[in-house]
Amino acid sequence: MAFKFPSAEWTEQFINEVNGSEAYASAAKNWEGDISLVIDGGGAIYLDLWHGKCRSGKYIEDPNSEKPAFKISATHDNWVKVLKGKLDPVQGLMTRQMKLEGNLVKIMQNVKAAQELVKCATKVPADV
């Protein structure tokens, strides 16, 4: 069964993948910080990430309703490329296909954690 992306249902499945991933837990063991994945014109996925786990998360209609340490914004089409494994978010940031609000140095120091987070997202069946 595919879940509408973005949606509360898709976000719930994504959080389950994150919390079930040993690879993410290992790669993100030192990560502290919440993040919003903003879909331009389509809401955001908010995740409270802490030492390899997602303590909480939700789909939010208004991306400005939360004030995370990190915000990554992109068009719906570019997020779909990420979900299909056709766009690496770090590469997307470097090529300005995605926009970061937050500490780029911290992201670059945790590239493996970011990659594992994306792998979790790609495992969730998405109706895009």
Image (spheres, rainbow, N blue to C red):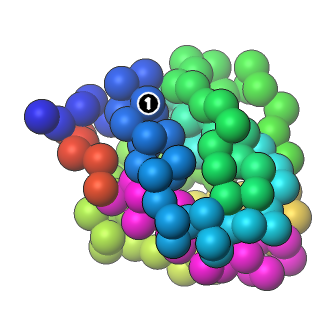
Could one spot residue 20 in this view of the protein? yes
Q: Could you tell me residue 64's position as x and y percent?
A: 74, 25
Question: Dividing the picture into quarters, in which one does residue 29 lie?
Answer: bottom right
Q: Quadrant of the N terminus?
A: top left
Q: Is 31 positioned to the left or the right of 6 in the image?
A: right
115 falls in the magenta region: yes
In the picture as drawn, the residue positioned furthest to the left comes out as: 1
Q: Secondary structure at mark 1?
A: helix
Q: Tell me which amino acid carries mark 1.
A: Glu
Residue at 64% from the left image edge and 43% from the top image edge = 54
Q: Is 54 positioned to the left or the right of 64 in the image?
A: left
Residue at 61% from the left image edge and 79% from the top image edge = 112
Q: Could you tell me residue 108's position as x and y percent?
A: 75, 80
Please name whichever residue, 24 or 96, is drawn nearer the observer in this view of the structure. Answer: 24
Compared with 9, 74 (above or below) is: below
Compared with 119, 15 (above or below) is: above
Question: Dividing the picture into quarters, in which one does residue 2 lie?
Answer: top left
Q: Is 47 positioned to the left or the right of 5 in the image?
A: right
Please name whichever residue, 106 or 79, is drawn nearer the observer in this view of the structure. Answer: 106
Q: Could you tell me residue 13's position as x and y percent?
A: 37, 36
Tell me the magenta residue range.
105-122
Task: Please rate how many residues cluster around mark 1, counting C-alpha atoms within 10 Å: few if below 14, some from 14 to 19, many from 20.
Answer: some
Please name whichever residue, 74 or 34, is drawn nearer the observer in this view of the structure. Answer: 34
Q: Quadrant of the C terminus?
A: top left
Residue at 32% from the left image edge and 70% from the top image edge = 85
Question: Dividing the picture into quarters, in which one does residue 65 lie?
Answer: top right
Could one spot residue 79 in this view of the protein? no
Instruction: Find disc 1 in the rendering and name its residue.
Output: 12
Residue at 87% from the left image edge and 64% from the top image edge = 103
Q: How many callouts does the rendering have?
A: 1
SS assignment for the magenta stretch, majority? helix
